[in-house]
């Protein structure tokens, strides 16, 4: 019998011995588990609003369209600073310039379109309506989106997760009790991805026309803002040992 054969035989004997010991001893067997999913959600009032707005300008002369657009954008930025919006909460982006042609057999140049997008985070919701009206008067003629959200969702996610874990333990205890069992220590736990669902008022890709209103008209009207709430959700998968 070769040396390799002897080694293989010894490994086989060792494997058989371990297997027999695992069958005889309870710790080697898989524990009896109960697996549940715990979920929880918290509804939170939003404390900031993000405005994604834009200024579109047209003219047959590209330079004129660009200078006119720049002037209106500067007015919007000035209004934001005057309202107390910090520089870090204002971002200009998506500058676009393109010619517009007719759909004739031989296209002719109609004009040039210049667009500039501005994203502003407003942390004082009480200023939203007045500031938005001022933006429209200053030359904003497109609203890409308006969303209300929570500035620091982390603490609410932690609370939702704690509630989800408590819900999982309660569910496991109830299920085990119906089977005449009790729940022991947790065996595994994992958190499902996802978590926040924002219930907000949103205006998507809206072109604004005739937006100017007098101060008297604004004061006479009730607020048209309905921010709703932000729903913070958590879901965990937990397995408990049964006793």
Image (cartoon, rainbow, N blue to C red):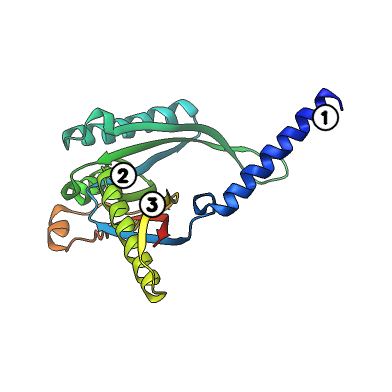
Q: Which residue is mark 2?
A: 50
Return the disc, 2 or 1, that comes first in the chain's sequence: 1
Circle 3 residues within 10 Å: few <14, some 14–19, many ≥20: some
Tell me the quadrant of the picture where the N terminus can be found. Answer: top right
* 103 lies left or right of 172: right
Which-is-in-front pick, marks 3 and 2? 3
The reply to whether dot 2 and dot 1 touch (C-beta < 8 Å) is no
* 203 lies left or right of 127: right
Which labelled disc corresponds to residue 195?
Answer: 3
The reply to whether residue 221 is in sight is yes
Q: Which residue is mark 1?
A: 5
Residue displayed at 42% across by 74% down: 179
Residue 22 location, x and y as percent? 58, 49
Depth check, front residue: 132 or 237: 237
Tell me the quadrant of the picture where the C terminus can be found. Answer: bottom left
Residue displayed at 32% across by 52% down: 161
Residue displayed at 71% across by 34% down: 11
Q: Secondary structure at mark 2?
A: strand
* 142 lies left or right of 214: right
Return the disc, 3 or 2, that comes first in the chain's sequence: 2
Residue displayed at 21% across by 51% down: 129
Q: Secondary structure at mark 1?
A: helix
Q: Distance between the Cα atoms at labels 3 and 1? A: 58 Å
- Residue 61's place in the image compared with 161, above or below, is above
């Amino acid at each position: 019998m070769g040396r390799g054969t002897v080694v293989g035989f010894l490994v086989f004997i060792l494997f058989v011995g371990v297997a027999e010991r695992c069958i005889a001893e309870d710790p080697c067997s898989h524990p009896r588990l109960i697996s549940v999913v715990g979920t929880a959600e918290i509804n939170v009032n939003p404390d900031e609003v993000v405005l994604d707005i834009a200024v579109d300008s047209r003219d047959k002369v590209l330079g004129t369209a660009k200078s006119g657009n720049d002037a209106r954008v500067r007015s919007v930025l000035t209004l934001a600073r005057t309202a107390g919006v910090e520089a870090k909460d204002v971002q200009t982006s998506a500058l676009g310039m393109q010619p517009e042609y007719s759909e004739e057999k031989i296209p002719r140049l109609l004009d040039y379109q210049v667009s500039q997008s501005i994203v502003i985070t407003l942390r004082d919701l009480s200023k939203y309506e007045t500031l938005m009206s001022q933006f429209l008067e200053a030359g904003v003629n497109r609203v890409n989106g308006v969303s209300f959200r929570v500035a620091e969702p982390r603490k609410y996610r932690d609370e939702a997760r704690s509630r989800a874990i408590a819900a999982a333990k309660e569910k496991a205890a109830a299920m085990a009790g119906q089977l005449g069992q009790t729940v022991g220590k947790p065996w595994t736990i994992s958190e499902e991805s996802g978590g926040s669902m924002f219930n907000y008022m949103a205006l998507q890709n809206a072109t604004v026309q005739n937006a100017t209103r007098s101060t008297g008209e604004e004061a006479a009207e009730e607020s048209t803002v309905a921010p709703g709430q932000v729903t913070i959700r958590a879901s965990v998968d937990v397995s408990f040992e049964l006793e």
